[in-house]
Amino acid sequence: MADSEVSDRWRDFFGFGQPYDNQADAIESAIQAGRAKGFLAMEGPCGTGKTMAALTAGATLVREGDYERIVVVTPVKQQLQQFVDDLRTMNAGLDDPLRGVSLVGKRDLCPYGREGVFPDDVGTHDRCDDLREHTARLVESDGNSDDRPVASTAVGGESEEVWWDPQLGSDLAKHARPDGPGQQVFEDALETAGATSPYRRSQPNAPESMVEGDDTPLYCPFEADWYARNKGSPVDFGVGANHVVTADDYLPAATERGTCPHRVMGVLLDEADVVVGNYNHLFDPDSRPLLESVLDEQTFVVVDEAHRLEERVRDLLSDRVGRATLKRARNDCQALLSRASQTSEHKKQVRDRLASHEVPLEAVERARDFYDAALTWLDERVADFLTREYGPEWRGGTTADLPDRTVEVPLRDPETVEQDELTAWAEDEGYTGDLWRSLPGIGVAVEDTIDELGLTRTPVCGAVGVIAKRWWEHDHASYLREVELEYSPADEHGVDRPWQTQYTAGLVLFECMPGDTLKDVFAGLGGGVLMSATLEPLDVFAEVAGLEALRRADRPVVERTYTLPFPEENRASWLVDATPFTAHNRGDPTENGDPETWTATRDEYAHVLRTLARSPGNVMIAMPNYREAAWAGEYLRDAVDKSVLVDESSTNDETEELKRDFFAGGGKVLVTSTRGTLTEGVDYDGDKLHCCAVVGIPLVNIGSPRVRAVRRAYADAFGEDNAFEYALTVPAVRRARQTIGRVIRGHDEVGTRALVGRRYTENARHGVHGYLSPGEREEFLRLTPEFLSSQIERFWRDHPAPE
């Protein structure tokens, strides 16, 4: 089919009356890129209609036979719901609607976990895994059940060896009901999400008739019912509005029918035309298996909020194992060794169980010794670091001089590619690669043996072994290895070392180069759209997100940038040419409480802040960090006749309360950090915000070992001249652009925007003007601080002033 025919056909799927001009171009660009098995990188500000554009393009490609499905990922819950809403809107006008499913985590779907039935010291994920394994053993077929129903060999669209007996699954499900089948309403039924299950609230033990000996393990009747249905689902897309199902639909529906909601979600996922999830589902190695069956060249991917890719995927690919977890792994091995040492019969029992995994008892002993020695090394490394950096006083229990923040302890020079200290120590002690690589297998054998012997502990050595193997095998150019001292004050009871009253220690394997993984993920898919309101400069984004590597491999990459579609006369945008607001120029805010002692730069910015804060209506001022926000808030409380709210690093509940106060009306000033949670992903629509200003360039701490390691890795990949720009400057400017994007969210909204600091202006030394979008570079007016007040007054004379 010709491109022109495709362009006409997409209008059949578009969910609204007429598209915006930019929206139509975005749809057609996405279709063309998708049909060429390529990717569209798109910057589209609020009002572009990115969500409907991406879904319309994907729906056209699916219905035209170019792809089998669309997979959407977004890191923002609000955006996930927007995709669901837009898909439902699209489906409302289609005779053959697309089947859609929205994904959530297992923790949100397990009826037992949701209702607090599991023990407090056991996580839902781990408990579910254990129950699934117990249930699988109970339903395993002996191959002699000719008179029982035959399980389907087509599961998830692929053939699967049928090893389970559906009748056994049915028997187990019935065993968990109070009075047999048909009894639905009864006292002490397990209820969740407004739905009543057919099972008791307490978890059932297997019936004695289905087990050998005295062991009657706990099992999951919801899981058993799934096997009874031949791994099928009693819930279909019809339970959701316009054939789009969310957890609000399939969780209660599956619970009422007695089938595992998480398994139901998996069945729907395999049958869906559109799958909507979060970044974890696509990029996290631990969560990706859920989507594995639908990730191939027949998948069209939509990556929302793509400016977050580097940061979020870097976090997902990094590993951390805490000291307490390392200690538990040591104790897992010791528990098994202690069991084996009790009697010769116990030793044979343990050896036989381990032998089924081809793991000798001596290997468990070696792993125990390694974990024990690693714990000692970790404690000594932390003690040496704290003594060297902050003095020896803490050893006597005086921790007041230790910093009240998380501290990084790099195990190599972040700017030099070399072996880390822990690995070097291990080699010197004889713990070589053969041991590190064997730890995952030893861990699985230990965990299974502990479970089979009924020892009362929840082992972790399997997961720790996986991280240990990665630690050994990953290179030293793309990964930085650290000890992280997470600030976590605790009392003195139950700690082994004085510093533990301040910190929780852990080993971190930090991913510096997420682009390599992103390239591999995208290479395994058919094509797609990566979109955000702030992707510029697109050439830099293409490099760090792995798209440029795909382009070099002959995969097309199309780039589009659209301007803000709302009336320009409804907004004023300024670049305030003030002295660069750098740490060197402004001085320490905590040492400048008295205006008489302020630096000239801080005094200049006090004038700018005062002018902005007096602007009509709600004003948000974003400072480079929370320390500067605290200074600005304290100053403005005395300088302006408005209520001043100061954000700080706090809990979600506290942040929500602050937002409610700000939105309550009356014209307030909200001072926050540009790197905080209030500057991105928060909807300030309507009259919630009338002026937004970003002060300075919100660079991360460039002295951080992780930042230095990223910069070194980027220098190797993209050239020394580009390293600082790619790793630090561009992400910081995107943060600033996201922040000013909080104001002007609709055609009728009115407000002002300001980027404050000379580095935002054209031709400035160390300037960032070129990192703004083309539309922003054209629209933002440069002015000096003394003209800011008159410009604000002029704008609001021509527009209805907010209260």
Image (cartoon, rainbow, N blue to C red):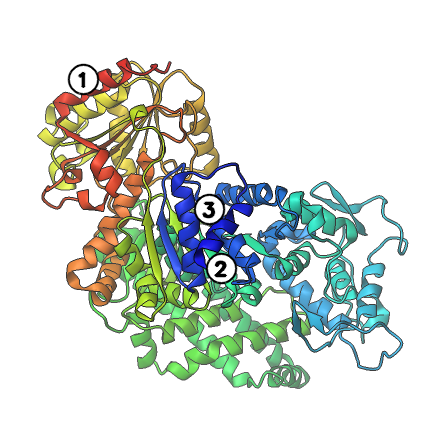
Q: Is residue 168 left or right of residue 243?
A: right
Q: Which residue is mark 3?
A: 53
- In whole angstroms, how far apart are the C-alphas of marks 1 and 2? 51 Å
Residue at 57% in and 67% down? 293
Count residues near mark 1 (Cα–Cα under 10 Å), then give few for <14, some for 14-19, many for 20+: few
Say which mark, if any, is on residue 790: 1
Using the rendered view, name the quadrant where residue 412 is placed. Answer: bottom left
Residue for badge 2: 300
Question: Tag 3 or tag 1, which sits nearer the N-term?
Answer: 3
Residue 122's place in the image compared with 608, above or below, is below
Q: Residue at x 73, y 58 (%)?
A: 233
Pick whichever of labels 3 and 2 is earlier in the sequence.
3
Kindly state the secondary structure of the residue where label 2 is placed: strand
Q: Are marks 1 and 3 in contact (CB under 8 Å)?
A: no
Cα distance between the residues tagged 3 and 2: 14 Å
For the C terminus, give its image quadrant. top left
Q: CA distance from mark 1 to mark 3?
A: 41 Å
The reply to whether residue 122 is visible in this rendering is no
Q: Position of residue 634 (x, y in %)?
A: 27, 24
Which amino acid, mark 3?
Ala
